[in-house]
Amino acid sequence: MSFVDPVFLVFFTAVFVVHWALARWRRVQNAWLALVSFVFYGWIQPWLCALLLTSSVLNFALGLAVERDAARRDTWVGAAVALNLGILGGFKYFDFFEEAVVATLRVLHFAAHPTTLQVALPVGLSFYTFHAMAYVIDVWRGQFKARTDLVDFLVFIGLFPQLVAGPIARAHALLPQVENPRTFQGAQIASGLSLALWGAFKKVVIADTMAPYVNIVYAHDDPTFAMIWLAALGFSIQVLADFTGYTDMARGTARMLGFELLDNFNHPYLATSPMDFWTRWHISFSTWLRDYVYMPASFSPWVRRWITVPGTGDWSPFWHTARSLTITMFLSGIWHGSTWNYIAWGGYYAVIGTVWAWAQQKVPRKTRKARDWRPVLVPLMFLHTLVGMMIFREPSVGRLLTHFAKNPFAGSPESWVVAGGLAMVCLFGALPLVAALLFETYALPKLQRGPWWATFQSTAWAVALTAIVVFYRPTVNDFVYFQF
């Protein structure tokens, strides 16, 4: 079930009414949330509920084992990591590894044929697997007590607003909200509705309107330089509207049920460096990688043995950053998918992050502080982001190389007309996002304190709802991050 499917309105209305009718009985309320979350998840493919339940129960039991069996706690946390990565890898990478093995055997002149088994990735598997694995690791680290109430744990793992595409919930932030009573507050409901409608607007009006134009260019046999790079720009706008739209709908619907989820984005295209970008884009995933990949890699004795200045053997902070970043971004690329463009994408961000860190070391601190460099750094970083979006969107590495080698001035008159149309589409998609940023920064704080706030809010709801209805199409695209 998708947030922009009309049936979701009926589903959420029923969930909302019953949820608040049960507000006096928190345990019953949580049991209701667990039930409807499984209904939401298994709406199209009911067998997915068995996978979600199995993963949740096993991680719940492993968390208790880590806390209660001190002599074998390392063994239990290792089992949890192996279990979660095994489930994720089995579904996500079976076909990729099978194709690689078959190709290798054929090179060695062995007869090999791929099986007919096609393993589909269950929607949301990556996200709730990361929820569960982080919980067990935090219990092992002593940062969190293992929970003994299975129903509360099922709500923590499977709460439907954040189940299929995040934000990736952390136990210390979400479990206390599950375990404590929630009260009905009108202002909270109105705020959640506003957020959800804005998210739906971004998804339906911006992302889904731009997607066909972007897809047509990437499906073209030989797009010109102008066409492919404007399509990359269009995709950068599409994916931002799509993913932030999902996050806003997740946060808005959760807020209407009394939960506060992490804000997953903070204007990432205003970043001034690769590191700054990853503190703004998909924040829950970036912080997950920082806490469970980058930091362990940084302080691992095995990794530190290799963090030396080449030719000297001396420990180097620069190589420390470079190698930990390479490990992290390589794994990030693999997480996004089992095609080579995602691996290249992870490698690209590892390289530019390393180069940027090296360049920062070379620039004197006084020079960096002498003036505001944002007017220079923001466009430069956005250009790097645009290249990353090109790598991310183009599944064929061979075609990707030809895109970078194209003549910027080549093309027929017709292709320049197409490029002009793409530029207008990009402008259409960017204007609402820019206007929203300016409004949020300069007008919203004053308006919320004024007497016209309620009138403005209800009018904005009506305008957003009207635009969603007008732009909605039955062939609506799935959210981009459903595939991960």
Image (cartoon, rainbow, N blue to C red):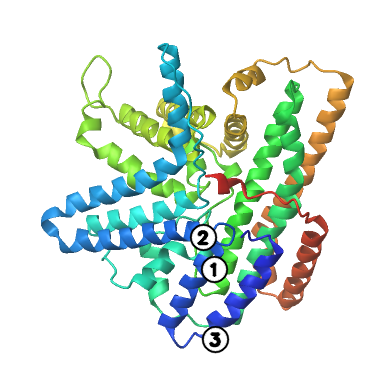
Q: Is residue 62 visible?
A: yes
Q: Is residue 74 above or below residue 2?
A: above
Q: How far is the residue under mark 3 from the one under mark 1?
A: 16 Å
Look at mark 3 in the image and give the residue it sits on: 21
Occupied quadrant, residue 381: top right
Look at mark 2 in the image and give the residue it sits on: 162
Q: Residues within 10 Å of mark 1 (few under 14, many from 20)?
A: many
Q: Is residue 326 above or below residue 286?
A: above
**What residue type is disc 2 on?**
Gln
Q: Where's residue 132, x and y in %? A: 36, 56
**What residue type is disc 3 on?**
Ala
Q: In the visual, does 304 lie left or right of 278? A: left
Query: Which numbered marker is on residue 254?
Result: 1
Q: Secondary structure at mark 1?
A: helix
Q: How far is the residue under mark 1 from the one under mark 2?
A: 8 Å
Occupied quadrant, residue 193: bottom right
Q: Is residue 426 visible?
A: no
Contact between labelled residues 2 and 1, with CB atoms less than 8 Å apart:
yes
Q: Where's residue 433, x and y in %? A: 70, 50
Residue at 81% x, 29% y: name it: 419
- Going from the N terminus, do you reach mark 3 or mark 1 first? 3
Q: Residues within 10 Å of mark 2 (few under 14, many from 20)?
A: many
Q: Is residue 124 above or below residue 228?
A: below
Residue at 21% x, 23% y: name it: 314
Query: Is 270 or 185 nearer to us in this picture?
Result: 185
User: Looking at the image, is mark 3 or mark 1 nearer the viewer?
Assistant: 3
Residue at 75% x, 74% y: name it: 458
Q: How far is the residue under mark 3 from the one under mark 2?
A: 22 Å
